[in-house]
Image (cartoon, rainbow, N blue to C red):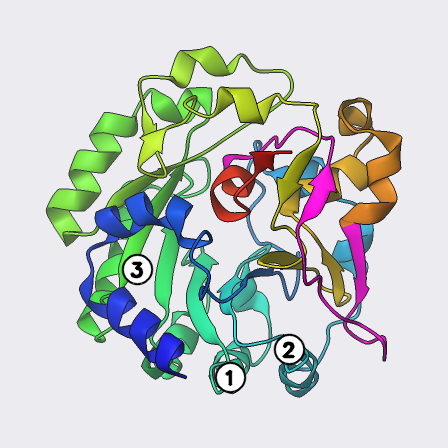
Amino acid sequence: MLIKKLVQITNKFLPEKPKLHLARFYSRLPFSPPRIGFTPLLECNYSCSYCFNKNYINPYFRKCARIDYQEWVSLFNKFPTSLVTIGGGEPLLYKDMDKLIQGMAKKHIISQVITNLSVNLDVLIKAKKSGFRVMASFHPEMIIKEEFLKSLLYLKNKGLKNIMVNYIATPQNLEKYGEYKEFFEKKTGYFFRLDAYEDLKRDLSNIGQYQIYGINYLADREKYNNYLPKKCNGGSKYLVVMPDASVYRCGVSLLYIFAPEYKELVNPLDLGKFYIGNLKDSNFKIDKKDFVCHSPCRWICDIELANVRKC
């Protein structure tokens, strides 16, 4: 509980930019709780052309029957106290999201909710005492900046001030990055965060000048393309929970397992190891030690949050 209180105080008072700089070192601390990426549903009211979920994640997850919020709270009791990021799809399409956040916050630290702010904003206001950050994803393909600004200011005026604007670093988005950054930071005072974007069809070298996650995106290129055995906290300090309650070691493992475009990048011996189990299984448990993997980390979140290192 002391760690939970410390994290909540840090989230409340430490500005967003320093937190992003510290994020990549956080999981190395021996007392740090696990981080869980939680997707209660994959449905979304947007259809962004660059969406990984739409383009690569198995459609099965979009067809899963929704799990009731009370069952989710019970299932998450199988985890130790953890930092939980709730995303999607669009998570605010989930019925009773405010009750889900509040229920889970009794044991876990709700780190952030990632949302496009297009629906059900009052859900966030109802749950704001849980102390989470809103990662507000701005997608100019789907909404103009003035309309997105209205949603940001609505939340701010309702007392929900722990907000960051998130912007995906696609080639087309990078063309107007400076314009949008200046607009939103000037109008709201919120940090405008450039999020990593990666695709097999794209040459990453043209975004080396941009700061993503507070560091140079290509600084860890050696790890990014490394096929040698590597130790990783995925499965112990970093986990991903999908809408059917299945649990995986990392976000990119879902691409390795289900997306044909990515299977050539993975050692076949690793595939079965990426899946940990289902929270509904009576014998479910997370790992107590590091995972050894031959596959490259194709997302920078895996490098930062799972603390990948060579054997």
Residue at 82%, 53% in the rendered image:
60
What is the CA distance from the residue labelled 3 to the residue labelled 2?
30 Å
- Are the residues tagged 3 and 2 within 8 Å (C-beta)? no
Q: Is residue 293 magenta?
A: yes
Q: Which residue is mark 1?
A: 107
Q: Is residue 239 left or right of residue 10?
A: right
Name the residue at 49% across, 67% down. Answer: 33
Across and down, in percent, residue 273 comes to 82, 47
Q: Nearer the viewer, residue 65 or 140?
A: 65
Q: Give whichever of 295, 173 is nearer the camera.
A: 295
Magenta span: chief secondary structure? loop
Mark 2 residue type: Phe
Instruction: Answer with mark 1 or mark 2, whichever residue precedes in sequence.
Output: 2
State the residue position of label 2.
76
Picture quarter containing residue 112? Answer: bottom left
Magenta span covers which residues? 275-300
Work out whether 222 lies above or below 122: above
The local secondary structure at tag 3 comes to helix
* Residue 40 x/y as whole percent: 64, 66
Residue 204 visible from this viewpoint: yes
State the separation of the CA atoms marked 1 and 2: 9 Å
Crowding at mark 2 (Cα within 10 Å: few <14, some 14-19, many 20+): some
In whole angstroms, how far apart are the C-alphas of marks 1 and 3?
A: 30 Å
Marks 1 and 3: which is nearer the front?
A: 1
Residue at image location 39% in from the left, 69% down from the top: 121
